[in-house]
Amino acid sequence: MRFAVTVGRKGSGDLLEAAKSWAEHFGVPYLERASKGSLEELLRQHNLEAILVATADGPQIYNKEGTFFYHLGMAVLRLQRLKNNEHDHFASALELKEGMRVLDGTLGLAGDAAIASYLVGEEGRVVGTEASLLLHFVVEKGLRAYEAEDCDLTKALRRITTVQATAEQYLESCEADSFDVVYFDPMFRYPVQGSSAMEPLRPVAYEKPLNQRTLALALKAAPKIVIKERSEKILREYGCTEILGRRYSRIKFGIIRR
Ligand SMILES: C[S@@+](CC[C@H](N)C(=O)[O-])C[C@H]1O[C@@H](n2cnc3c(N)ncnc32)[C@H](O)[C@@H]1O
């Protein structure tokens, strides 16, 4: 991925230092911000795919689709619903309970991981792997710093451990039975405009489909795998033997058990 780092227009002092240190950390150029000129121009002039921008609200990713910064997305509403004893398809597919150890192999914006972390509580453990360098960077900083209105949610965010790696790379280092469940929500193979919070991030996300080796490693690390997909056909191809989700529902969860 061709990217560089810069600072928000009003950035000075600490932000400038942060941007320079991030550029050094990633081994990519730090771009001076002229008093005029947009991020779009910088992207074009330097032939980049993305720019990481240090702002007072945390790191942001700018690409041709727009700007991305860490946010809670649907997690706030989902948590409220759980607290009202309403149903959450993800939680029931994973059968999440206090004390469980969960690996989220496709962390993304960590919305699902936040719900898992809340449900498994302090005695449980949620690890999330994210293959995209930039997404991992922004989301990891968000999980450490974001203050949600609901302090249970803030605590759940802080308990998530993130790893910048592909799920396969991380699973190779896992002992057998180190988790109770491994979850995958890979990028949909056939994107539909506006269908997911992840779509604008597609250019910076990791798009390869899951492979059989990753699934075999996951099944060694945990007795159960849950995969989120649109198509039952794809889930069956992965080897899922149970499919949750109504016939016409947009999202389905496929389950593979050891
Ligand atoms: C659809 S999003 C996941 C959204 C997430 N469930 C949430 O609630 O925010 C998929 C994310 O997983 C990452 N990803 C896809 N395949 C991966 C893999 N094999 N290993 C690690 N990360 C992966 C992508 O870069 C992307 O950020």
Image (cartoon, helix red, strand yellow):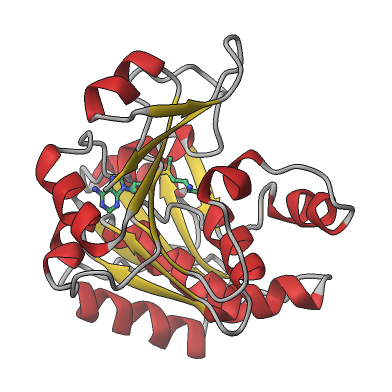
Is residue 26 in view from this perspective? yes
Left or right, residue 162 beside residue 44: right
Residue 120 locus on image (x, y percent)? 59, 70
Residue at coordinates 60% horizontally, 9% vertically from top-left? 248
Residue at coordinates 46% horizontally, 32% vertically from top-left? 199
Q: Residue 107, relative to residue 172: is it above or below? A: above
Residue 21 locus on image (x, y percent)? 30, 84
Left or right, residue 115 beside residue 6: right
Residue at coordinates 84% horizontally, 55% vertically from top-left? 80
Is residue 13 in view from this perspective? no
Residue 203 image-quadrant placement: top left
Left or right, residue 88 beside residue 201: right
Outermost right residue: 84
Q: How many marks?
A: 0
Residue 14 locus on image (x, y percent)? 50, 90
For the residue pair 133 and 130, the one nearer the viewer reads as 130
For the residue pair 195 and 242, the one nearer the viewer reads as 242
Residue at coordinates 45% horizontally, 21% vertically from top-left? 230
For the residue pair 64 and 44, the one nearer the viewer reads as 64
Residue 6 locus on image (x, y percent)? 38, 66
For the residue pair 84 and 67, the one nearer the viewer reads as 84
Q: Residue 141, relative to residue 168: is it above or below? A: below
Outermost top residue: 248
Residue 245 image-quadrant placement: top right
Residue 184 image-quadrant placement: top left
